[in-house]
Image (tube, rainbow, N blue to C red):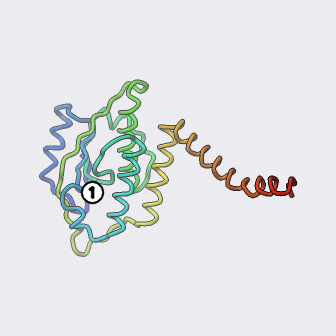
């Protein structure tokens, strides 16, 4: 069981989350705070925007429907923990865990793993008065987006490099338009 130590999650959900793991109904249980009180309790508007952005991006890229990517309230099976390569050092760890589970679910034929994800709706309360978050909205948000890009490249290289190639093709056509326009107009290329 993993839980943030800032007293924002209720302990009451821990048993339900652990039971899903122990009964082998899930390999990772995600404490979904976004479906409950998060958006009314959290007073930081850019965090709300960031949560929506990261959720939408990961769900689109990894063909999933996870409601809360950035939650710090999770339970894990032994198999998940033993296969998870911890590469992150900061707040992007939740993103990395979610993508690891989703990518292995998508690649189950190749990796011989099919991680089951479950979400449990949990309450959320804002930080207690006087406590200070170590989260830097912009720096850590950029790190999370960078992690999504890196893991997208690692787990879905064909799509990643195809999109990159398409982007460079569009840019090269944009730079080439004036040259072709001049050629068709004058018959010369300066």
Image check: 66 left or right of 86?
Answer: left
Q: Where is residue 7 in the image (x, y as percent from the top left)?
A: 21, 62
From this view, report whether residue 6 is shown above or below residue 155: below
- In the rendered image, the residue lying farthest to the front is 185
For residue 186, what is the image quadrant? bottom right
* Count of numbered circles on the image: 1
Q: Where is residue 122 in the image (x, y as percent from the top left)?
A: 18, 53
Q: What element carries label 1?
A: loop
Q: Position of residue 133 (x, y in %)?
A: 33, 68
Q: Which residue is drawn at 48% across and 43% down?
A: 152
From this view, report whether residue 64 is shown above or below residue 38: above
Q: Which of 88 and 64 is in front in this view?
A: 64
Q: Residue at x 45, y 46 (%)?
A: 87
From this view, report whether residue 7 is shown above or below residue 12: below
Q: Which of 43 and 97 is in front in this view?
A: 43
Q: Residue at x 33, y 38 (%)?
A: 81
Q: Which of 111 and 77 is in front in this view?
A: 111
Q: In which quarter of the image is the C terminus?
A: bottom right
Callout 1: few (<14), some (14-19), or many (20+) C-alpha neighbours within 10 Å? few
Residue bearing mark 1? 4
Q: Nearer the viewer, residue 63 or 9?
A: 63
Image check: 179 left or right of 80?
Answer: right
Q: Quadrant of the N terminus?
A: top left
- In the rendered image, the residue lying farthest to the bottom is 130
Q: Which residue is drawn at 18% across and 50% down?
A: 121
Q: Position of residue 14 (x, y in %)?
A: 16, 48
């Amino acid at each position: 069981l993993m839980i943030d130590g800032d007293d924002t999650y209720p302990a009451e959900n821990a048993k339900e989350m652990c039971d899903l793991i122990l009964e082998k109904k899930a390999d990772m249980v995600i404490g979904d705070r976004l479906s409950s009180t998060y958006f009314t309790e959290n007073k930081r508007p850019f965090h709300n925007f960031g949560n929506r952005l990261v959720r939408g991006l990961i769900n689109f890229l990894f063909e999933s429907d996870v409601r809360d990517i950035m939650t710090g309230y999770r339970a894990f099976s032994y198999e998940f923990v033993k296969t998870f390569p911890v590469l992150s050092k900061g707040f992007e760890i939740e993103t990395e865990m979610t993508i690891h589970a989703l990518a292995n679910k998508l690649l189950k034929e190749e990796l011989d793993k099919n991680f089951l994800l479950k979400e449990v709706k949990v309450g959320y309360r804002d930080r207690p008065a006087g406590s200070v978050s170590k989260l830097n909205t912009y720096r850590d948000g950029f790190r999370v987006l960078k992690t999504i890009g890196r893991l997208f490249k690692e787990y879905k290289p064909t799509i990643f490099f195809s999109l990159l190639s398409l982007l460079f093709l569009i840019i090269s056509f944009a730079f080439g338009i004036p040259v072709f326009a001049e050629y068709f107009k004058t018959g010369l290329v300066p």
